[in-house]
Amino acid sequence: MSEPVGSSQEHKQFAAERGPIAVAIVTCSDSRTLETDTNYHYLRREIEAAGHRVVAYRIIKDEPDLVAVTLDAFASGEAQVIIFNGGTGISQRDTTYDVLARKLDKTIPGFGELFRMLSWDQIGAAAMMSRATAGVYRGTVVFSTPGSHKAVQLAWQKLIAPELQHVAWEVWR
């Protein structure tokens, strides 16, 4: 089948034919463990239920060097998509966004814009403090969400899951 030139729906159909997506999950937290990382357990369950694969997982402290090393390691592996959660706020400890913003080759500004718009319904004006972002790094799609469980659920259900195969295909083609 040749690549479609047409609509977003045609692109999604073509992307679906490429098969499951390999996803890595990174939790940026000073306090979570494997047992208490509800975001990882939620994302793993959702990713696998959608027919995709979790190929890597790591909990790291929100330290710039750790974020950069993890991004490099996972982008060099089999992951086609990396989902970071945590470190997108404006406190001094929140550095994930800053590292990713410096390293992304291309940004997907609409992800952060839509996430904040959708967050408005849940948390009101506090949504403006989220620095959720997405982009492409070395041919790997990167999503970065806040660390709250509701934020991860919102990002997955409304933005990432509906476009996961499509966005990965756009980077492949």
Image: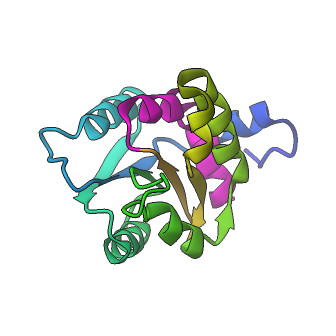
Residue 21: x and y in percent read 46, 46
Residue 155: x and y in percent read 52, 35
Which residue is at a point 32% across and 63% down the rendered structure image?
62
Could you tell me if residue 158 is visible in this image?
A: no
Residue 15: x and y in percent read 63, 42
Asked if residue 36 is positioned above or below residue 26 in the image, the reply reads above
Q: Nearer the viewer, residue 42 or 53?
A: 42
Asked if residue 98 is positioned above or below residue 53 in the image, the reply reads below
The image quarter containing residue 116 is top right
Q: Which residues are magenta?
A: 147-173
Asked if residue 75 is positioned above or below residue 58 in the image, the reply reads below
Q: Report the quarter where the N terminus lies.
A: top right
Residue 77: x and y in percent read 37, 68
Asked if residue 119 is positioned above or below residue 15 in the image, the reply reads above
Which residue is at a point 59% across and 54% down the rendered structure image?
134
Which residue is at a point 49% across and 52% down the rendered structure image?
144
Q: Nearer the viewer, residue 86 or 123?
A: 123
In the rendered structure, does residue 2 fall within the stretch colored magenta?
no
For the stretch drawn in magenta, what is the main secondary structure?
A: helix
Which residue is at a point 31% across and 31% down the rendered structure image?
42
Q: How is the image coloured?
A: rainbow
The image quarter containing residue 139 is bottom right
